[in-house]
Amino acid sequence: MTLRHAILATLLDGEASGYELSKWFDPEVPYFWHCAAQQLYAELTRLEDAGLTAGREVVQERRPNKRVYTLTEAGHAELTRFVATDTKQSFIRDDLLVKMYTAEAGEAEVLLEQLEKRAVELRARIAWFDDLLARLRGGRSEQEFLADGERIGRYLAAVRGRSFECDNLAWCTWAEQVLRARELGDPPPALPAP
Amino acid sequence: MTLRHAILATLLDGEASGYELSKWFDPEVPYFWHCAAQQLYAELTRLEDAGLTAGREVVQERRPNKRVYTLTEAGHAELTRFVATDTKQSFIRDDLLVKMYTAEAGEAEVLLEQLEKRAVELRARIAWFDDLLARLRGGRSEQEFLADGERIGRYLAAVRGRSFECDNLAWCTWAEQVLRARELGDPPPALPAP
DNA sequence: AGGCCCATGTAATCTGTTACATGATTCC
DNA sequence: GGAATCATGTAACAGATTACATGGGCCT
């Protein structure tokens, strides 16, 4: 159950409401973890019941009231304990890979469309990460920030996210070229970087 | 429900038993999809009931009997239909990323251990993929194989898998260096490739 | 008037994981 | 004698997804 710990980790950056967290965990805007809003709200209730977070009602005027959460001592302790546990493997789980697996000579059109569509999404996500990284650096150069910037883990996680999207994009464009070359009987493209 | 389609896609390579498939889907040996053996056997039963695969009992002498499955026409049609559907986004879901998120100056030791352990695993998985890719090429060079090799999708999927592990490893070693440099007050390492 | 943002849920269902079970054979 | 391989499951539970619900404020 890592959603629990992903929420606790996010609260290291300060108090947040369920709605704010739901933006960071939105599957469309993928940072380092994602889930549907419903799951998040359910988990927040459980975390507060378990004493790992403390909730506080904030009354608003032209907006619905909201509940903001902060980490408790017990929450910090639970995070520390979690970090020291054995880590599961990382997996890809990507529908597009299953679709690619079916590729065979002559039926490439639909797959090429899928690859192009994916590439467009990936470019948007890379841009989103670039933007996020710039905001986290807050004006400093990357060298400066890496040397002594605050909340370095948050930054490193974002770099990983960006890297994943870039790697994915490089593969998509390469695979597209391989399939196109085969359709045309051209020589295959050079390999992507190691 | 993509496990269903991952199984159908794997059966494009010819008939296979549940046990054989469970090797390809083993979470320890991650190719393009993974699941526990129990889930696989359950799904195979459902696929046969749905008429997407045809099962055949194979009686063996010094081994337990087994059931081998082949794709039916309906199974092929279902795969084709699936390939044309909208594709979901690809996500990372990695406990280590959540752990990294908590990194802050002074508490890096545990994280460094985790990163090193992960790096060891990743190197083993890259070697596994190198081996698989060589077997799929069957003696041909990559250029030759990409030009007109059989079951190209299977190969492209394996390249993606390898690429993911490599990218992950590059980030792990880089993040390790960043954290170490901060511990020592040294200048941070150069950035990983774009 | 229609749609999006804020803010938080319930309910049902589907998917995935963990624990446990069986039993012969082959390898060290 | 003990572990690994072959071969396939059942049962219980945890986690994730999908559908649906509410209601005021703000923007065009």
Image (tube, coloured by chain):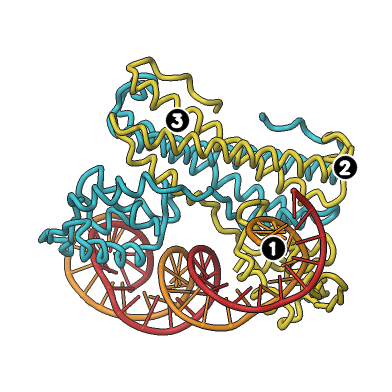
Chain colours: A cyan, B yellow, C red, D orange
Instruction: Label 3: state its secondary structure.
Output: helix
At mark 2, the secondary structure is loop
The residue pinned by badge 2 equals: B138
Q: Is residue B24 above or below residue A14?
A: below
Instruction: Report the quarter where the N terminus of chain B lies.
Output: bottom right
Same chain check for tags 2 and 1 = yes
Dot 3 falls on which chain? B
Write down the residue under mark 3.
B175
Q: Is residue A125 left or right of residue B39?
A: left
At 45% from the left and 19% from the top, the residue drawn is B189
Find residue B22 and name its label. Answer: 1
- Quadrant of residue B143 within the rendered picture: top right
Q: Of marks 2 and 3, which one's residue comes earlier in the chain?
A: 2
Residue B41, percent from left and from top? 67, 73
Judge by depth and name the residue closer to the eye, A93 or A126. A93
Residue A172: x %, y % from top left = 66, 43
Q: Residues within 10 Å of mark 3 (few under 14, many from 20)?
A: many
Q: Is residue C2 left or right of residue D27?
A: right
Above or below — where is A91 with respect to B143?
below
